[in-house]
Amino acid sequence: MIEVEHLTKKYGDLVAIRDLTFKVEKGKIWGFLGPNAAGKTTTMRILTGYLPATDGRARVGGFDVFDETDKVKRIIGYLPEVVPLYPEMTVQGYLKFVAEIKKIPSPEIKKAVDRVIDRVGLSPVRTRLIKNISRGYRQRVGLAQALIHDPEVLILDEPTIGLDPAQIIEIRQLIRSFKGERTIILSTHILAEVTQTCDGVVIINEGQLMASGSLDELTASLLDKDGVWLKLRQAGTEVATLFQNLPHVSSVAVENGGLRIEWPKGHDLRDEITRLVVEKNLGLEEMRPLAMNIEDLYLKVISGGGIRK
Amino acid sequence: MRNIWAICKKEIQTYFTSPIAYVVITVFLVLVGFFFYSLIWWFNSQSLQMAQNPYYFQQLNINQMVFSPLFHNISIILLLVIPLLSMRLLAEEKKIKTDELLFTSPLSINQIILGKYSAALVVLLTMLVLTWIPVLFTFIYGNPELAPLLNGYLGLFLVGASFMAIGLFFSSVTENQIVAAMLTFGALLLFWVLNWAAYSATGFWRDVLNYLSFFQHFDDMTRGILDTSDLVYYLSVIFLGLFLTHAVIQSRRWR
């Protein structure tokens, strides 16, 4: 649905994004991760036709973003980082205006406005002025404006920023509810958001693609080791040596007041470790598998040059 | 056309839901009222004096003695007021980042510009139409000629529309409304008085400076002269203003 090939954008001498290539399939939700100034917003602006790219191609819904901008604009709903709201307008007045400029036929405008107001839960504030409603509602008006023309593709730039935890959960649920019917790219700083809402990620840093793929693929390919984390009543270097001497153990390290024991993928040392703990009466308090989570993935990718798929 | 209207409608709404339009129009009308009153009062006293002398009495002409100077006064007020009406048009969109909504909608830049410009013209027209209230009284108590009056109003509208186009352009180059207003005001005043420089210039440059000055073209129109070269002048200024606005928006996106 969204294909980006060798996309490059320069602002004068500053390279915002460099040779970016990724693909998002229809009906999937993809997270766009990266530190500040990594080029996330720039990429989104190019996809929505707000900015032209310096080089490369991008296609949305089969239309070229540069040659068929008008068609692309019709099938994209875009929520920019700063929600584009007119403070002096009422919520429904604003949505009506957006419906008009998104070229919804006049007889259907009222229905479209009612539909999005219902969908994102704006009924309590529909006649209020935008400047008088809370931040959470403003964010929802932003989502409503992106949804009003029933777009196939949604591009959301930090949709949950500045919201309280309850609102974040609501917005996430809303976004998740689009899964399957719309293709979505959302950028975020919140790593948990990606695991909770997204099917895949694109990680960029300093304008370059560090990794892209589905979450399972990425974690699997990044994780070449297995391991456990143990908390024992007895600790110390001699205990660590005991584990170090087990066959196949690649490393033992003290971490968070416990031991982190790792071995290469393909083995399973959990039985041996348990047996050792019981035999030596080390006093097991806690044991859990080391799983590569999204934070590990992110840090590894950002710091370690990344992987490509 | 529908898209231009959508933008235009929203812009008019913004003018009239904020205090801007009301304040600007009120102050404008108070000033126009004051000038009108002074001129009528002066005309009245002249009429009384001349009443003794039938020859001079024949020379009295309300169009020339009241309306022509009134139009000049109004045009100066417009010079001060229009930058305040135009400064918001594009600068505000950039400031509050709503330009991102406009430029990712399936609208062309031209439609956005024309929508905004036409909304500003509606406000201008409202201002000018409201100045007819005192003018109507002169028809009740006197007999001014209608044609030169309408011609003068056409002149005012064209001057105002040219100012607005230049204001729109300066509104596109910055996201700060004060900066936009000041640049507009400076440019308008400069174009207004360009013919002063013409006094000391000679030959070709004298003609050029005279032609470029707003004043020269407007003066003809207040005296009831409708010359196509004046019309061409104003329409060119308007076109140039809108064209440059388009160029600024386009270049910003490609930078």
Image: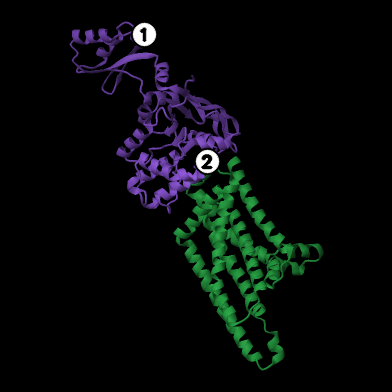
Chain colours: A purple, B green
Number of marks in picture: 2
Residue A280 vs B58, above or below: the answer is above
Extreme-top residue of the structure: A247
Secondary structure found at label 1: loop
- Compared across the picture, whether B84 is left or right of A116 comes to right
Camera-nearest residue between A52 and A220 = A52
Percent from the top left, x then y, of residue A77?
47, 37
Percent from the top left, x then y, of residue A290?
32, 18
Extreme-bottom residue of the structure: B52
**What is the chain letter for disc 1?**
A
Extreme-right residue of the structure: B203
Secondary structure found at label 2: loop
Q: Which image quadrant is residue A221 in?
A: top left
Per the rendering, the mark at residue B164 is none
**Amino acid type for the residue under numbered disc 2:** Thr
Per the rendering, the mark at residue B104 is 2
Per the rendering, the mark at residue A266 is 1
Q: Disc 1 to disc 2, how far (Cα)? A: 50 Å
Percent from the top left, x then y, of residue A177?
36, 31
Q: Residues within 10 Å of mark 2 (few under 14, many from 20)?
A: many
Camera-nearest residue between A4 and B48 = B48
- Compared across the picture, whether B228 is left or right of A186 comes to right
Residue B240 vs A168, above or below: the answer is below
Q: Residues within 10 Å of mark 1 (few under 14, many from 20)?
A: few
**Amino acid type for the residue under numbered disc 1:** Gly
Q: Are marks 1 and 2 on the same chain?
A: no
Camera-nearest residue between B191 and A143 = A143
Q: Quadrant of the C terminus of chain B?
A: top right
Percent from the top left, x then y, of residue A289?
29, 17
